[in-house]
């Protein structure tokens, strides 16, 4: 029996090589969501495919666990709704039973018995005439492939939106809250300016020139990141308390 189960689901291993492509797509979409928000071209950075894939696996895992948390919350809500519905039906049945005259309570019993008999007959008939399960048929296989593609695109789209949200939050902290712990300084010869770095590739870094309010590219060694110990300490406290 175990061998038969493995034989039926062995085709799932064919899709394992597709995971690195999804990881790459998630991280690339995450970067793209940030660079497009400031009108920069991601191709200018010259990203390393291996690094993008590695960081993409982390982004994919983060999105996956966030999805699990949302499913968990939705499941708890469904359980509460189910309990409320069962409680309502139970109270309604008790009220109906008490409200009916004892001479007419057989009508309720007959109704319940008929529904139970119909349900029992339906399941008994289906079990006596089982339909063959054909998981490897072309039709089901195509549906399964489309389902996996949809899930993959959903993760990539989620990563893109996550990138947009990330840069909006950081720029809000910089421009509105005047918190420059997310930014740094770029030195190009004698010229210095404050910059917000988004992504660095093999050739250049893409970021935002905060002094002139425009997107820019610079060499990785020209950038120095600011560090605010108080902000770091506050974030550490938040993570520790949560």
Image: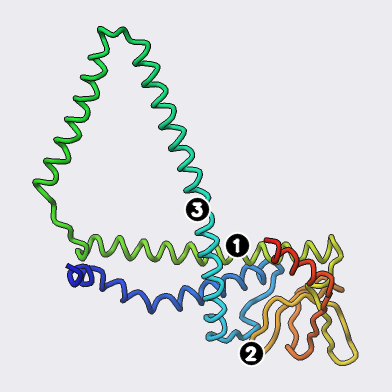
Question: Which one is earlier in the sequence, the residue at label 2 or at label 1?
Answer: 1
Q: Quadrant of the C terminus?
A: bottom right
- Height in image: 137 above or below 193? above
Q: Circle 3 is placed at which residue position? A: 72
Looking at the image, residue 146 lies above or below residue 217: above
List x then y, in percent, for residue 114.
19, 25
Q: Could you tell which of marks 1 and 3 lies nearer the N-terminus?
A: 3
Residue closer to the observer: 103 or 48: 103
Residue 202 tag number = 2
> Residue 192 versus residue 170: which sits nearer the camera?
170
Q: Are marks 3 and 2 in contact (CB under 8 Å)?
A: no
Which quarter of the picture shows residue 117? top left
Few, some or many residues within 10 Å of mark 1 (<14, 14–19, 20+): some
Q: What residue appears at the point 33 percent right and 10 percent down from the top-left corner?
A: 100
Q: Which residue is mark 1?
A: 161
Q: Measuring 74% from the left and 69% from the top, which residue is drawn there?
A: 236
Q: Marks 2 and 1, how far apart in space?
A: 25 Å
């Amino acid at each position: 029996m175990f061998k038969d189960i493995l034989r039926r689901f062995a085709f799932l291993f064919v899709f394992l090589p597709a995971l690195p492509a999804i990881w790459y797509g998630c991280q690339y979409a995450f970067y793209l969501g940030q660079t497009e928000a400031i009108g920069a071209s991601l191709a200018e950075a010259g990203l390393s495919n291996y690094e993008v894939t590695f960081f993409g696996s982390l982004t994919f895992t983060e999105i996956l666990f966030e999805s699990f948390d949302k499913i968990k919350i939705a499941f708890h809500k469904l359980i509460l709704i189910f309990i409320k519905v069962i409680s309502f039906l139970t109270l309604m049945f008790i009220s109906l039973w008490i409200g009916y005259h004892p001479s007419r309570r057989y009508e309720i019993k007959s109704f319940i018995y008929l529904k139970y008999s119909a349900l029992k007959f339906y399941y008994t008939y289906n079990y006596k005439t089982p339909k063959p399960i054909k998981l490897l048929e072309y039709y089901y296989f195509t549906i399964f492939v489309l389902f996996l593609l949809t899930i993959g695109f959903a993760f990539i789209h989620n990563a893109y939106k996550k990138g947009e949200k990330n840069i909006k939050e950081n720029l809000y902290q910089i421009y509105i809250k005047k918190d420059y712990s997310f930014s740094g300084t770029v030195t190009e010869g004698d010229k210095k300016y404050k910059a917000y770095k988004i992504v660095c590739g093999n050739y250049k870094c893409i970021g935002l020139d905060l002094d002139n309010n425009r997107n820019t590219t610079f060499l990785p060694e020209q950038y120095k990141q600011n560090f605010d110990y108080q902000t770091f300490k506050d974030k550490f406290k938040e993570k520790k308390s949560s």
